[in-house]
Amino acid sequence: MTEEQVDNPLYSDTAYDDAFRTMESRCDDLVIPFVNHMFGEDYDSKAVIKRLRNEHYVEHENESSEKRITDSSFEIIAKGKVKRYHLECESKKYTGEILVRIFEYGTQIAKDEASGEKYRMNFKFPNSGLLLLRKTKGAPEAATIGIILPDGREFAYQVPLIKISDYDIEDIFSKRLYMLLPFYIFNFESELTDINDSEEKLEMMFSAYDEIYDRLDKELEKGNLSEISFHAIIRLIHRVAYKLTMKCENVQKKVGDIMGGKVLDLPEFVAYDQAKAEGRAEGEAKERVESIKIFVRDKIEDKIPVEKIIVKLKKSYDLSADEAKRYIDQCMAEIK
């Protein structure tokens, strides 16, 4: 990895998560088929996606708090019904540890919509699913999270697993799993060094990505893809491949030659990026306020005493006691 590579605007240390979140937050026509396949749903183009907050604060035994951000949390409204989903994208080798985080996130999400009366509270967990980017030998179609209640009863729910290694180009297009395309390069990960040193294998990779582009173009023409999703996929294929091939410059250049030349800035993206740049100061201020309010609401929901919340706010956000108290009062009023 060279300094020049790291300084390139294409490089991001969080490229994989960024790619997943970009598609999930901007491209409904990518999310719907992905959810249909993962959870066996049959949503059509009339289904509406409502994005939910994905920031939560986890309280530790030493009274410290840790900010956790889920890869995606959203509802789909269709035919008068509402279902909540929580998706995670895992770029590390699967070990099972992420199931702890998925349960933890699910618990926080369930708390957001808790309902009930004085002596009964109901917590509805979201439909959780996991996308595995790296090959995992022997991985089943779903993982299982089990819950043992105080009286000994056991309940379990499944977390569907989608593994990139299970899908070739034909699978992806026939099932409209376009969200997998930016991560298709992971199918070559174990061979990247050999591909990098072989002109013949480089040409084979070139052909694969050339086919991907041509088929995407046809999907756009047929109306199976929106223009913004079409260009998002191409941009993200380039960014993800750039990150994964930092030690294989020939491969990096080859994919860049195919996808880099196809990248166009759509008006929607340009407007978004310009607004973000022009309003950065204002945006950062609003983001800070929202972050503080999320922090406070979580503490109130966890029944942390006001005095302790004030101490935490002073330490975490450099607020005065009066400022901290105003935030707490405001959040309490909103919760009521």
Image (cartoon, grey):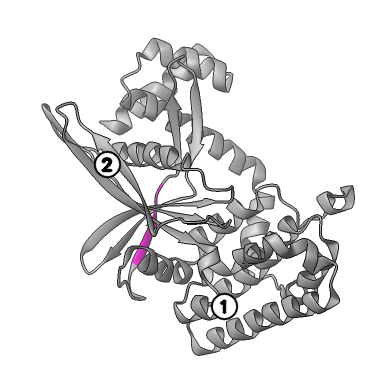
Provide the residue designation for mark 2: 113
Q: How many numbered discs, if any?
A: 2
User: Is residue 278 toward the left or the right of residue 6 in the image?
Assistant: left
Disc 2 residue type? Glu
Q: Residue at x 60, y 63 (%)?
A: 183
- Furthest-front residue in this view: 138
Q: Residues within 10 Å of mark 1 (few under 14, many from 20)?
A: some
Is 45 or 278 nearer to us in this picture?
45
Q: Residue 284 lies in magenta, yes or no?
A: no
Q: Residue 50 lies in magenta, yes or no?
A: yes
Q: Which residues are magenta?
A: 48-52
* Residue 242 seen in render: yes
- Furthest-top residue in this view: 307
Please tell me whether residue 40 is drawn above or below residue 274 in the rendered image: below
Q: Is label 1 in a helix, a strand or a loop?
A: helix
Q: Which mark is residue 169?
A: 1
Is 16 or 207 nearer to us in this picture?
207
Picture coordinates of residue 75, whole percent (x, y): 34, 56
Q: Which mark is residue 93?
A: none
Of labels 2 and 1, the one closer to you: 1
Q: Quadrant of residue 78?
A: bottom left
